[in-house]
Amino acid sequence: MTQLKNVFTAWAAGALLLACEGTPETLDASHELAYCHTQVCRSLDELRQAEGGQMDYNMMPRNVLKGEKQWNCRRADNPEEWCNGFWPGILWYDYEATGDETIRQEAERFTQQLEYLSRRPAFDHDLGFLIYCSYGNGFRLTGREDYRQVILATADTLATLYRPQVGTILSWPRNVGVFGGHNTIMDNMINLEMLMWASRNGGSRQLAEIAINHADKTMKYHFRPDFTSYHVAVYDTLTGDFLRGCTHQGLADHTMWARGQAWAIYGFTTMYRFTRSESYLEFVQQVADVYLQRLPDDGVPYWDFDDPQIPTAPRDASAAAVVASALLELADYVPAVKANYYVEAARKMLSSLSSKAYQSRKANPSFLLHSTGHLPAGSEIDASIIYADYYYIEALLRLQRVERGEALYPEYDEVK
């Protein structure tokens, strides 16, 4: 049974105490969703103007770099571009928030550009980001059968990267030689949602087995004793033995890269939704708690929690948005006192992200400033990045439902 009615009661009872501890009380999810709609319409107008008044639906917004004013776009027909599902997903979320039929039509047109991914071999693990964020939200809101078929076909494609001798999905086939073995990155936890959903909606049961095996092995080897995560786990390609944990986008092999920890919190929360496995629920709380305990006062992490340049190191608004969204779901699965803690932590994160310090507002057409993509590579540092916007609007929609006392996923309350 959902805990959300208890969560809301606990939230109201504890509001004064939490205000004294510094949690902003002015956050209005509906107001911030209206802001997102304004920015979506602005983005659509500017994208159309950039093409001489004719929208090029093959070009997906990716980032606005520091000091720039417009979206840098990537081609949807490039299978190596992992972020292309987020813009259609944002449009679907905006349609959900507003009911604006014009936005729905734009969501359909951008989503359609990714259909080809269901018909080609997997380039890497990112198919969940690409297809479930776009077609997944589209199916949820429209029930279109062709959307379901695209998701099912893509789930089967993602499953081809699973290696039974290892027990996880190979994240980057192109980098097996670089890492010296089968590599699985923490980001891959997000792609398991598509496999789990597909297995319940017409796909093979094996898809769920793959996802569960992947999550179980990740839980066993991808974390240090203090529940901080490696970005990359490397396994022997032949035996499946764990070789080492290391980083690719974090500061160092031993540090806590903020977005990697965020992916872990989100991914294991999702796996609990589908399985109701108590091992996932207990584990994800420990992973979330170490993240929360080390946050700066405003709830928005530095890009890596162990960067010696803190407090002048770059922040990562994208990690804050991912965790805020995840915590609002996680709150539905834990007792009321812990749920209240997670809801208020998410509210604090979203309050900060919704402030003038982090919202893009007139600076550019994105939702948020101050995300960090790949600092070691010098890429997307202190930028507006599309996936930060995606998880921000998702988190606001979830907060709206939590404050109404509604369950986020009532269809999974009784897992069979």
Image: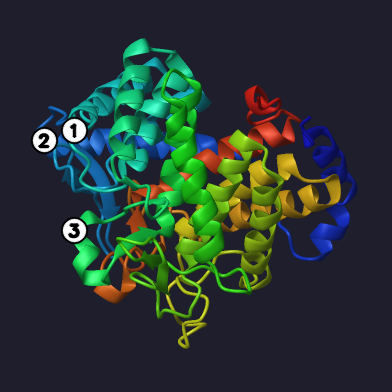
Secondary structure beneath dot 3 equals helix
Image quadrant in which you'd find residue 16: bottom right
Label 3, label 2: how far apart the Cα atoms are:
34 Å
Residue holding disc 3: 174
Which one is nearer the viewer's eye here, 315 or 287? 287
Answer whether residue 102 is visible to the viewer in this image. yes
Q: Relative to residue 358, is residue 377 drawn left or right?
A: left
Q: Residue at x 67, y 25 (%)?
A: 410
Relative image position of residue 128 (x, y in whole percent):
37, 39
| Circle 3 or circle 2, nearest the eye | 3
Residue holding disc 1: 48
Residue flagged by tag 3: what amino acid is it?
Arg
Residue holding disc 2: 51
Q: Relative to residue 294, is residue 65 drawn left or right?
A: left
Residue extending furthest front? 239
Label 1, label 3: how far apart the Cα atoms are:
35 Å
Quadrant occupied by the N terminus: top right
Secondary structure beneath dot 1 equals helix
Q: Residue at x 28, y 53 (%)?
A: 63
Closer to the chain start, of discs 1 and 3, is: 1
- Residue 31 vertical position relative to residue 290 in the rendered view, above or below: above
